[in-house]
Amino acid sequence: MFAVLSTARKAMGRAALCLSLFTLAACDAVMLPDVSGGGPSVDTNAPVQVAMLLPRSDPGAAPVARSLENAARLAIADLQGARIDLRVYDTAGSASTAAAQAQRAVDEGAKIILGPLFGEAANAAGVAVADEGVNVLSFSNNPTIAGGNVFVLGNTFENSASRLLSYASSQGKGRVAVLHTNNVPGQVGRNAVQSAASRSGATVVGTESYDLTTESLTAALGRIKALMAQQNAQSLVLTDDWAGGLRFVLELGPEQGIGPATTQYMGVSRWDSRPDGFNLPGIQGGWFTLPNQATQRSFEARYTAAYGSAPHELAGLGFDGIAAIGALISQGRRDALTGRSLTQSAGFQGSGGVFRLLANGTNQRGLAIATVRNNQMVILDPAPRSFSGAGF
């Protein structure tokens, strides 16, 4: 079973691999100096120079880069009371090139950097310009590179886990077990669930890991089933995604006696991206998170009308970065792009709803809780529209 999966994943090529794992690659993040709160002074009466670092010449990531740039330009067209001079620099998907281009952009007048796409490149770019106090809004979702002058815009496991476990606690299903892949993304997902549980009133009764083989997954399911019975667990949180072994977990879990009628399945990855998986037994009634659907559909429709094709699933991050920068510049303050301003508590309106940047370099996003009923996605709890509402 997993041999077929492995072959299919290889056939998808470098682009698919990068898009599923790029933000959580096992790389050593360089610790950045604490310049939180700082940033360059800007003249908001003139166009503010923004550098966008993208892997334009990387064959595997060029389509994503193009979509991110298109979305950023779409956001610029929306701005009122703010003028942005967007200049795009090619990182070629390389961390060393990203560092050099970040320094070049600042030397040429950039007041803030949007991108790069890959986590390692974002870390390198942040290090390169930290001594000049320029902030970096990366498209990564890797929390290990966040901090100092580097912020991550991508939706994190922490976001999804916090929303899911808060909802689970409110529904009386807060005793959870975690089943995760035995790799860096799986471990980050597990840690996010454990961290979120401590804030939401939920309890993680235990965790189990598996390699991407049928034998390993079957054995892990047996162990997690026994653990859940011993600890009276009500829910099972999965960290895997469709690019990995999620399909097989949702198929084999019920076959091994972990049925959705008695166990609440939850996932910290996006389950709605593969509607052809909605017929799997484990997904029936399962909970997962997703952005504000009305806002996201509006963004997608506008993008398609402007560029003649649908945006890549990460394109909204380009829109969000410009939306945040533009909103701050429109306030007319010289400290618009400092860390203190970027982390304003009210946050910003983005392509998928409300979001805000946190002082530790990560982010918080308004997410909905969804499920699958009769092979159709159903919203159980809408995404909050502001940070003063329920859902946070």
Image (spheres, rainbow, N blue to C red):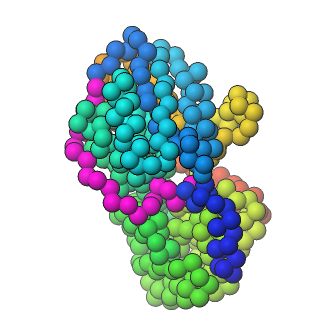
Q: Quadrant of residue 295?
A: top right
The answer to whether 162 is drawn above or below residue 205 in the figure is above
Q: Is residue 374 magenta?
A: no
Q: Residue at x 27, y 39 (%)?
A: 130
Give left or right: position of 221 versus 306: left
Give left or right: position of 279 versus 161: right
Q: Nearer the viewer, residue 149 or 248?
A: 149
- Whether residue 381 is visible: no
Q: Position of residue 192 (x, y in %)?
A: 41, 62
Q: Residue at x 72, y 71 (%)?
A: 280
The answer to whether 115 is drawn above or below residue 172 in the figure is above
Give left or right: position of 276 versus 146: right
Q: Quadrant of residue 261?
A: bottom right
Q: Residue at x 74, y 38 (%)?
A: 309
Q: Position of residue 216 (x, y in %)?
A: 55, 85
- Whether residue 102 is visible: yes
Q: Residue at x 47, y 65 (%)?
A: 185
* Figure label count: 0
Q: Considering the whole magenta stretch, tell me its main secondary structure.
A: loop
Q: Nearer the viewer, residue 345 or 146?
A: 146
Q: Nearer the viewer, residue 149 or 203?
A: 149
Write the start and end of the magenta stretch as one range: 19-40
Q: Is residue 24 magenta?
A: yes
Q: Position of residue 64 (x, y in %)?
A: 60, 44
Q: Quadrant of the N terminus?
A: bottom right
Q: Position of residue 306 (x, y in %)?
A: 70, 28
